[in-house]
Amino acid sequence: MPDLSRITCIEDLRVIAQRRVPKMFYDYADSGSWTEGTYRANESDFQKIKLRQRVAVDMEGRSTKSTMIGQEVTMPVAIAPTGLTGMQHADGEILGARAAKAFGIPFTLSTMSICSLEDIAEHTGGHPFWFQLYVMRDRDFIERLIERARAANVSALQLTLDLQILGQRHKDIKNGLTAPPKPTLTNLMDLATKPRWCMGMLGTKRRTFGNIAGHAKGVKDLSSLSSWTAEQFDPTLSWADVEWIKKLWGGKLILKGVMDVEDARLAAASGADALIVSNHGGRQLDGAPSSIEALPAIAEAVGTEIEVWMDGGIRSGQDVLKARALGARGTLIGRSFLYGLGAFGEAGVTRALQIIQRELDLTMAFCGRTQIDEVDSSILLPGTF
Ligand SMILES: Cc1cc2nc3c(=O)[nH]c(=O)nc-3n(C[C@H](O)[C@H](O)[C@H](O)COP(=O)(O)O)c2cc1C
């Protein structure tokens, strides 16, 4: 195990990930759509919110423990679904799921993961995890995927609603993103500077979309796989499909990608267990508000009917606390997780979680609170949110 005691913030992990992960995959993580304005605002809008420092309050016996859809969590943070995670580090999804299990928070596997549902089940001893579903045109494939999720002991389904079509990310186009990378001269020169990553990849058989390859009709090789995935995101997705998925799955359902109060009302009326205020980490509609800006109105409108969570821009435990204060019962982290993974594998994910929990715990104390479940907007300075 590497000694990570001098890694003190998520930014440290980001810098190391940038050195260790091939450019194509680092850029895939560290980017937003078009001007990346929404991507940047997700982080910078957190900075505008100021905390009220309180003193001479008994700070003993603090706890960051809470629940998300009834599940006990060490802190109100889950790992968000991220595609191609097994390209940030060999077997990345397995490592992330293991770190989350040991820390006591939920891990979400993406439909577009490298490691499959079955891989996660096998390597975490059948520990329950969450699965994120993209609705594809091939509905038979979706039905089978849901069956596979059930067999893998998935305990909640996250249905992503904000990717019927793909937002344009300039870097991915310029880098010619594929999994695995094509052996072009540029890629080979880049890989030559990433020996750890290459060694990891040589030691695993998991190098392409594990939930799809060998499971979707007509997908035999890499080129048929890329054309299948490019054509499969279903632009016709509607609330009727949400109802269909809800019936088919029958378990806990989380709706991801809600940014508007009207949609939040529809999400609450759908009978789902939670909604995630999310702009997909600034990767879809550039020009949408940051998630933390959209959160308060949504929490106010539907927070008593459905659990409201948020993701986007969380790089510190302070951000988690601010989100909680503004009505998010739970939060999810995408890039903070990926940077830890890309930098040091499983140990890096664990370090990212430790950093966030410590920041959350200390900030809570400075704001005069000992229990995360007692935090509300009174910890924030009026006029700054
Ligand atoms: C590299 C990357 C891949 C992602 N892939 C998916 C995905 O497959 N499914 C999904 O619902 N969201 C996906 N997301 C969005 C995340 O689930 C989450 O909403 C976002 O990362 C939160 O913002 P943050 O990265 O600032 O924490 C992805 C995000 C990133 C950064």
Image (spheres, helix red, strand yellow):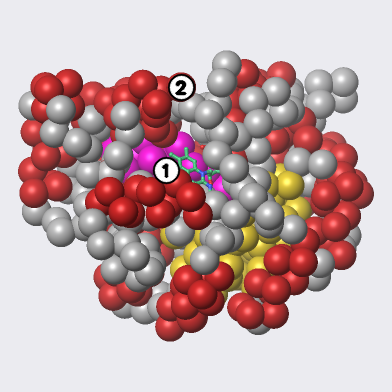
User: Which residue is at 32% across, 29% downward?
Assistant: 176
Q: Nearer the viewer, residue 325 or 250?
A: 250
Q: Nearer the viewer, residue 310 or 327?
A: 310
Q: In the rendered image, which quarter is residue 361 located in?
A: top right
Q: How far across and down, in percent of the image, does residue 284 sit?
A: 60, 34
Q: In the rendered image, which quarter is residue 285 located in?
A: top right
* Label 2 Cα crowd, 10 Å radius (few <14 / some 14-19 / many 20+): some
Report if the beta carbon of the residue with label 1 is closer than 8 angstroms to ligand 1.
Answer: yes
Q: Label 1 sits on what residue type?
A: Phe
Closer to viewer: mark 1 or mark 2: 2
Query: In the drawing, does residue 52 fall left or right of residue 127?
Result: right
- Residue 170's disc is 2
Q: In the rendered image, which quarter is residue 127 located in?
A: bottom left
Q: Secondary structure at mark 2?
A: helix
User: Which residue is at 71% across, 19% downward?
Assistant: 48
Q: How far across and down, in percent of the image, does residue 95 sit?
A: 29, 56
Q: How far across and down, in percent of the image, does residue 270 sit?
A: 81, 67
Q: Nearer the viewer, residue 239 or 353?
A: 239
96 above or below 55?
below
**Residue 358 shows up from this direction:** no
Q: How far across and down, in percent of the image, does residue 280 sit?
A: 59, 40
- Residue 337's disc is 1
Q: Secondary structure at mark 1?
A: helix
Q: Which residues are magenta?
A: 331-342
Q: Label 2 sits on what residue type?
A: His
